[in-house]
Image (tube, rainbow, N blue to C red):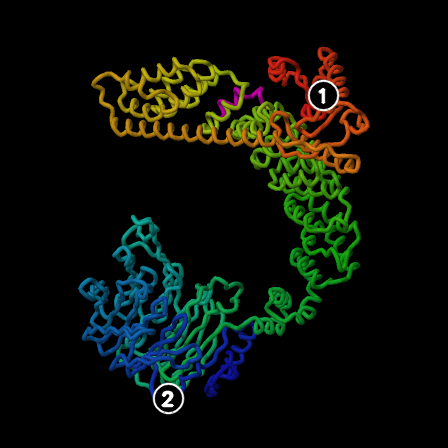
Amino acid sequence: MSQFPSENGVEGDDEREEEDDEDVEDEEEEEEEEEEPRLKYQRMGGSIPSLLSSEAASCIAVAERMIALGTYDGTIHILDFLGNQVKEFAAHSAAVNDLSFDIEGEYIGSCSDDGSVVLNSLFTDEKLKFEYHRPMKTIALDPDYARKTSRRFVAGGLAGHLYFNTKKWLGYRDQVLHSGEGPIHAVKWRTSLIAWANDAGVKVYDAANDQRITFIERPRGSPHPEILLPHLVWQDDTLLVIGWGMSVKIAAIRTNLNKGANGTYRHVTTSNMNQVDIVASFQTSYYISGIAPFGDALVVLAYIPGEEDGEKEFSSTIPSRQGNAQRPEVRIVSWNNDELATDALPVHGFEHYKAKDYSLAHAPFSGSSYAGGQWAAGDEPIYYIVSPKDVVIAKPRDAEDHISWLLQHGWHEKALAAVEAGQGRSELLDEVGSRYLDHLIVERKYAEAASLCPKLLRGSATAWERWVFHFAHLRQLPVLVPYMPTENPRLRDTAYEVALVAMATNPSFHKDLLSTVKIWPPVIYSALPVISAIEPQLNTSSMTDALKEALAELYVINGQYEKAFSLYADLMKPDIFDFIEKHNLHDSIREKVVQLMMLDCKQAVSLLIQNRDLITPSEVVSQLLSAGNKCDSRYFLHLYLHSLFEVNPHAGKDFHDMQVELYAEYDPKMLLPFLRGSQHYTLEKAYEICVRRDLLKEQVFILGRMGNSKQALAVIINELGDIEEAVEFVSMQHDDDLWEELIQQCLHKPEMVGVLLEHTVGNLDPLYIVNMVPNGLEIPRLRDRLVKIITDYRTETSLRHGCNDILKADCVNLLVKYYKEARRAVCLSNEEEDVRSKRDASRASQAIEKTPSVRNMEVKSKTRGGGRCCMCFDPFSIQNVSVVMFFCCHAYHTTCLMDSTYTNSSKKGTEATYQETYGYGDDDDEADDNDSQAGGPRMRCILCTTAAS
C-alpha cells in the first residue's frame, strides 16, 4: 500500500502495524507494483491543526468556494481550501450532525443533537433557526436556495419525521414528507429530487411534481445506524449512490421531461413506484464510512472491522474503544466491485475510532474532462477524509506522476501517448519513442505509427521517403499523408504524387485528399499524374463530391480553369462568382445558368446582366424554363427579367407578356412602373392578369392606355374609392367629357362631392360643380370646404396679380436700360489704337459666340469701335466712303456691306448654308416681315449674324 507522502503537507503518523504477517505485506506490495496509484494525499494545514487540537470534527461539507467543518461542541468553521479559517458560527449547543450548502455556496445549513436547524448566510448577517425539540441528524438545502424566494430545505432526525420547510406568505411552514419508519439518518437533494434514508430503506421524492418516485429497501444484515450510518451521494441528476453497511447500490432514476404551460420543462414521472433501475449492486468486506464518485468508478472510505466489531452481528450497543482499530482505507472500486487502488491512511488516533467516526466529502466537479484515468487541470476532484482530530485531502495523481510511473514499468507506448497529449516534458519523447514505431507496425497499428513519424523521423528526408514507400507497400499510405512534411525536409515529387493517388483510389480518404490538395503547396508535386488517376472515375459510383472538388482544385493548379468551373458549378460552391471574375470565365457561364441562380440568385443575375452580350436573354430564359422542379425557376425568371428591364427596357421585350404575370405573382408593387415603362406587352393579356389578381391601379392604367377612360374612371371611383386619384386621372386625360363623367358619378355620393370640391381647384370651376349638386343633398363639412375653396381662390388670384406686377416692372426697367444704351455714341479708334481695337473686337466676338441667339443677346455698354472695316479690313481713314456702325460696335464701309448683302440675297434660294451664315434663315422670318413693313430691308452685322447662326 502506498505510504502517506509527507512532502505534500503536514507529516503524518509514522506508526506501522508491526504485528501483521510479513508475507502478506510482501504479497500486497507485489500486487500494488502491478497497479498505478490513483491518488496522492496530504493533511489539511492552515487553521485545522490548532482547531482540532481543542475540538473534535464531526462532519464536513464542501462547496465550490469554501469548506464547512462541524464540531462536537456545536461550532461551524468556514475554511478556504488551504484550511484557513474564514468565519465561525456558534450555531448549536450540541454536536453538529450534518451540514449542507446551496449550489451557489451562499448559505450553509446545519442540524444538531440539540434539536435545532440553523441556516446562516455566508455573506450577510442573515440567520434562521428552527426548533424541532428532538435530535436532528441530517439536513439538505434546496440547491437553488439562494435563487428562489421559497427558501426550502429538508431535515430529519430521531423523531422519524422528514420535514419539508418552505417560506410562505405568512412565514415558514413545515410539511412532513414522511414519518413512521424510524429515524431519518441521511438526506441529499439534487435538482428537484430528494433522497433520504430511514430504518426501512431509501426513498426518493420529486419536489417538482410533489410525488414519491421510488423506494429502495435497506440491505439485509446492515449494521444498526448507531454503529454505521447510511451514506447517500448524487453522482449526477439521475444517479444515486447508496453506501450502507457493507452494501453499495447505484440507482438510476428515470424521469420524463414534459413542457409546462410557461414554456419551461419539468420532470414528470411515468408511474408511481417503478422509476428506478439498480444499475450496480455489490457487497464489500468492510464497513462503508463514506462514498463518492471518481469518474466512472467510486471512492470508498473503508473501515476494516475487527473481531470486536463483528461480535453480536451489529448489535445496537456501542462497542467500547480499546485502541485496536485498523487504519481507514481509501479504496477505488468499479461498479462491479473491482478494486482499482487501495491506500491505508495513517490518521491521528485511528486506533480509537469506529466506522461512524469517519466521513468522506468531495468537492463538486464536472467530471467531463475525465478520460483514461486523467483529468484536465483544474477539473480534478478533491476528496476530504475527516476524523475527529484530522482532515486528509486526497487528489488524483497528475500527468507527471503518471508518465514517471509508466516509464518505470516499461509501458513506453502509454508514456508516449501521455507526452503527445502534452502531459509530460518534451525531453521524454526520444526516450519513449525510439523503440515504438517498429512495434506498432508489427502490431498493425498503422495509424498510431503514422502519428509518431513526425516525432521520430523529424528532418530526415531519406527516412521519410523510406517510410512513405513502406506504407504504400502495406497499402496504408493514406494514414501517413496527414503527417508528411512539405518542407524541412521536402521530399521528392514522386513521394507526394504516390500519396495523393493512394487517397484518390480509396473512397474512404476522398475528404482527406481534398484537404491535402488544399494544404500542400502546388510546387512540391505535379498535378497531371493525380488528374489522370481521378478522371476515369468521373460519372461512376466511386466519384464522390469530395473527390470531384479535389479534381477541381487540381484543375486550378494545372491551369484548366474552365473544367474547374464546371465542377465548382455542379458542386454549388459559394465562391464560384469570385472564381469567375478572377479567371475571366464569363464565356463558361452559358451552360450553368440554373446552378448559378440556385447558388446565389442576386450575384447570378448581376453577372448575367453584365454579360448579356455573351449569353442572350432568350438563352437564360430557356435554361430557367427547362429547369423544371430543380428550383423555383419562375422566381429566378422574375429576378432576371426585372433587372434586365431596369438596365435596358427593350432588351427583354419578347418576354414582357411573361414579365407582367411574374410581376403580378412575385412583386405586384413593381407591376405599375413596369406597365408605364414598357410598350411591348399585350394590353388585353395584361388586363386579364390584373383582373384575375385584383390589381386595381394597374387595371386603371391599362384601361387608360387602351382608351377606355370611362371604365378606368369607374374602377377608380367604385373599386378604389379614391377621388383624389380620379381627379388626377381626369386631369391627365385632358377630356372635358371625362370631367362630366366624374361629376355625374360623384353626385350621388355626398362624401365624394365634398372631396371633389377640394381637389378640382385649378382644374375646374368649383361653382360649376356646386350648381350641378341636387337640391337637398347633404355634403359633409360643406361649409369648411367652401371656405377652403374661396381661400385658395383668393390666394391664387393674389399670386397672379403679384406676378403680373413684377413682370411689368421688369419689362419697364429693361426697356429703360436698353434705351439708355442705344443713345450712347460709339468712337471709332485710329491707327495707334488698332491693336487694342482688334483685341476688343475679338473679345466682343467671343462674347457673342457664347450666346444662342442675337435676339436674346444681353446688351452691354460699348463706347469704342474698331478702326477698320470688318469686311475688307482697310482703315476707314484711307477711303472717303460712308461708314455703317452697328450697335454691336462692328463697322463696315457702306459699299462693302451692300455688296455682301446683295451677294447673299442672290443665293438665298439655292444654298441653305449661306442663309444660316448671314442670318437670313427661317428663324428670322418674323424680323424680315417687320423690315418689309418698315419700307425696306434691314441691314445686319455680318459678323454677329454669322456667330448667332
Q: Quadrant of the C terminus?
A: top right
> Residue 914's image quarter?
top right
> Residue 709's image quarter?
top left
Give the structural element (helix, strand or loop) at label 2.
helix
> Residue 815's image quarter?
top right
| Location of residue 438 with respect to 825 vertically, above or below | below
Instruction: Give the mark nearer the N terminus: 2 vs 1.
Output: 2
Amino acid type, residue under disc 2 in the picture: Ser
Disc 2 marks which residue? 53
Q: Is residue 695 visible?
A: no
Give the structural element (helix, strand or loop) at label 1.
helix
Measuring from the top left, give residue 475's x and y in whole percent.
Answer: 71, 49
Q: Is residue 130 magenta?
A: no
> Could you tell me if the residues under marks 2 and 1 are in contact, i.e. CB atoms within 8 Å?
no
User: Magenta segment, which residues?
Assistant: 652-663
User: How much space separates mark 2 and mark 1, taking CA atoms?
Assistant: 129 Å
Q: Nearer the viewer, residue 118 or 853?
A: 853
Q: Nearer the viewer, residue 556 or 199?
A: 556
Decide whether the magenta segment is chiefly helix, strand or loop.
helix
